Image (cartoon, coloured by chain):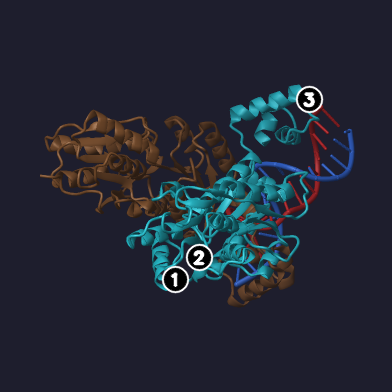
Chain colours: A brown, B cyan, C red, D blue
Amino acid sequence: MKHIAEEARVSIKTVSRVMNNDPAVKETTRSKVMDVAGTLGYRPNTPARTLVTGKSKTIGLLISDIGNYFFSEMVKGVQVATEEEGYSLLLCDTGENPDTELRCVDLLLGHKVDGLIMSSSRLQDEQISNIANYSDVVICNRIHPDEKVRSVCIEDEALHLATEHLIELGHRHFGYIGGPVRGRAAWMREEGCREVLARHGLEKPIVAAGFPVSIEGGYEAMNWILDVKPEVTGIVTYNDMLAIGAMKAIQARGLKVPEDISVVGFDDINFAAHADPPLTTISVPIFRFGYATAQLLFGAIRPGGNESPRHDVIKCHLVIRSSTGRVKA
Amino acid sequence: MKHIAEEARVSIKTVSRVMNNDPAVKETTRSKVMDVAGTLGYRPNTPARTLVTGKSKTIGLLISDIGNYFFSEMVKGVQVATEEEGYSLLLCDTGENPDTELRCVDLLLGHKVDGLIMSSSRLQDEQISNIANYSDVVICNRIHPDEKVRSVCIEDEALHLATEHLIELGHRHFGYIGGPVRGRAAWMREEGCREVLARHGLEKPIVAAGFPVSIEGGYEAMNWILDVKPEVTGIVTYNDMLAIGAMKAIQARGLKVPEDISVVGFDDINFAAHADPPLTTISVPIFRFGYATAQLLFGAIRPGGNESPRHDVIKCHLVIRSSTGRVKA
DNA sequence: ATGAAAGCGCTAACAT
DNA sequence: ATGTTAGCGCTTTCAT
């Protein structure tokens, strides 16, 4: 920058002004400075800027497993929003380990990130509160008592849409295959199903819980249900993987989907449409979820932005394919 | 840091020494400083450090689409290696757009990243060469004439393993479903297949090219092959998505996999094992690929590290499942 | 084993 | 419309 100043015969501050698009510089000066900067291959030094302004134009994103489609798609949403704002994204994968997570937060705070997005955090409420003293934070799929902590949630209750769909098709005997035992999302989804059945005065679903959240887990869970309560005709699941496993188990017993038993999933993963049969499921706009999360953060931290904390919910919708059908007469 | 110095009654430099684990500080001083730092909630300021040392303890990763499983898994590998080294990861998704990519590089260089990993770059060789003047760079799945540019490639030729497998099973009439028309990987894979057939003195495969690289694309491509050359019994594909689509097309015509036609894929995506029938494919250790890429970079940039540029290849292997079988007598 | 001073590249505050 | 000065938090000489 000093170089440029000398070469263009202006003060160093004028160069700074040009770089920051200060309107108060004469057009001739501006273009001269830009020229010189161009030939010198100048690039502003972000750390130096950060040191004096306290702003790094960088946000941190903590997730538990980028290999998981949900997170990679969410990262995409965050990334797009981040780039639109001219910010950079510091990514940490915590591997669901709270110690790692804490180390990552320290690292990110050391980098002076302007904001932090914490997805599936394993930290305690008060630890997060404490972090929020150093940086704006948005947490995902979790509610937090501290009002300065923003949050965005997937509408997990949307599983009620799937349940209602089955009820309309005439189903009366339900099974539910659950997700991670102590998760908020798992709880909300199960409630979404249960609550609708109760409202319609139908019997409670038989619940298969504690199985691995995978195709194999769904297979085992379904077999268990079929053993315990063979009269079920409607199966609601925590997610698509379980649903696909459940369909396989049903078919392995010589029964048909949806003629004998209907199955619905949650997530609408890529493969859901190609499952056998194509899976009826709740579609989660994951990209939009990530995008909205980042937007919420930028609303607070972008220059001039000063939105007060908020709690957003991303709506989901039902996608009807061929794994659900009218119950047999 | 000044605070700590005052509180601990030492000079600011001593605090710095403690923070950098300089062995030349008395144990009593060290612990006192650590104590004070702890109670004051001190955290080193990375940008300030970067400003003076020129090292940011940060690397940049450019990819074209994090929503793609290949990249998200690769990011995971890079991320793990990065964390092991105590570095941070700045992630950019270029959306396959060279202009965006250039902007991202500028951003990253402005952040003074210590190294850059460029996956599926859309830039010209010389543009990359130029970038390599400012930062160490490792490129993925591409070779580069400039010797200071390191690279790591997937062993795309590994498709020859799949082809040999089919030959052993007695197949003589082959079809190949190709990938992105002008990609290096697509070319290498197709060659891997072609070269083996030539070596065995077998007839050339019929090649379906230009179809979308998706399940749907594979479906259409297979239909085309079946129309043009119905005697094929061995289908080799650019990747698993195409292979799965091909199997669907075969089955839709009332033929059976593998009894009538055998199909092999490439990638071993999660779903390959759950396809109908489970897909024989080339397994790509994507995580290890990302990890190795990062390792190559750190070998060059980590303090004390000074490895000279290298060109690595990540080996792949054949996974035999149920989509391939002996050709009918 | 510890300290003092200079300066990394930039911007904020106050001139002019 | 442009320039001067100070200082962000840290590390690097060079002393002591």
Q: In this view, does A17 lie to the left or right of A83?
A: right
C-alpha distance separating marks 2 and 3: 77 Å
Residue at far front of view: B329
Residue A153 - label? none
Q: Helix or strand or loop: what does disc 3 sit on? A: loop
User: Relative to A90, is A80 above or below?
Assistant: below
Q: Is residue B177 visible?
A: no
Decide which of tag 1 and tag 2 comes sooner along the chain: 2
State which chain disc 1 sits on: B
Q: Mark 1 and mark 2: span between their CA atoms?
A: 9 Å
Marks 3 & 1 on one chain: yes
Residue A162 falls left or right of residue A97: left
Amino acid residing under circle 1? Lys
Q: Where is residue A254 in the image (x, y as percent from the top left)?
A: 26, 41
Q: What residue type is labelled 2?
A: His
Mark toward the start of the polypeptide (3 vs 1) = 3
Pointer 3: what residue? B26
**Other-residue count near label 3 (Cα within 10 Å), few / some / many at <14 / 14–19 / ≥20:** few
Comparing labels 3 and 1, the label whose residue is closer to the camera: 1
Kind of residue at disc 3:
Lys
First in sequence, mark 2 or 3: give its number: 3
Residue on which the image places disc 1: B229
Q: Mark 2 lies on which chain?
A: B
Element marked by disc 1:
loop
> What label sits on residue B173 in the rendered view?
2
Marks 3 & 1, CB-CB < 8 Å contact: no
Q: Where is residue B112 in the image (x, y as percent from the top left)?
A: 66, 54
Q: Nearer the viewer, mark 2 or mark 3?
A: 2
Report if the CB atoms under discs 1 and 2 are less than 8 Å apart. Answer: yes
Residue A218 picture quarter: top left
